[in-house]
Amino acid sequence: MNNLQALLLHAVDIFFYLLEMLILVRILLSWIVGYQGGSVMRLLYNLTEPILQPVRNMVDKSPLGGGVGLDFSPVFALILLRLVKALLMALIQMV
């Protein structure tokens, strides 16, 4: 493995770690009653919604999704992020 591959692997790892942490923080803050506003929540929403909304749309259209009353899109998004990360890291290591 050369230095460029190591750098790319590290960058991909950090990028996906940050995305996962942002989603987890958004989940935790959404559980705090009365903490719906504020600049932190808006920032988290703006950074994570481009990932969560497509996943939410897929879950709602699936035979199992919709109507449950709980938003499982963050869980599915975290799983998908892990899969995409593994795929990218494998591709980088192959080059």
Image (cartoon, rainbow, N blue to C red):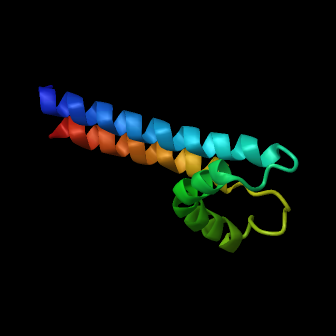
Residue 82 appears left or right of 77:
left
| Closer to the camera in the image, 81 or 14 | 14
Please tell me whether residue 88 is drawn above or below residue 13 in the rendered image: below
Image point (76%, 49%), residue name? 30
Residue 79 appears left or right of 39:
left
| Closer to the camera in the image, 20 or 66 | 20
Q: Quadrant of the N terminus?
A: top left
Residue 75 x %, y %: 65, 47
The total number of labels drawn is 0
Image point (74%, 43%), residue name? 29
Q: Quadrant of residue 93?
A: top left
Residue 35 x %, y %: 80, 49
Q: Quadrant of residue 48?
A: bottom right
Residue found at the far left of this picture: 2
Q: Quadrant of the C terminus?
A: top left
| Closer to the camera in the image, 45 or 2 | 45
Residue 84 x %, y %: 41, 48
Q: Quadrant of residue 20?
A: top right
Please tell me whether residue 41 is drawn above or below residue 49 in the rendered image: above
Image point (71%, 45%), residue name? 27
Residue found at the far bottom of this picture: 61
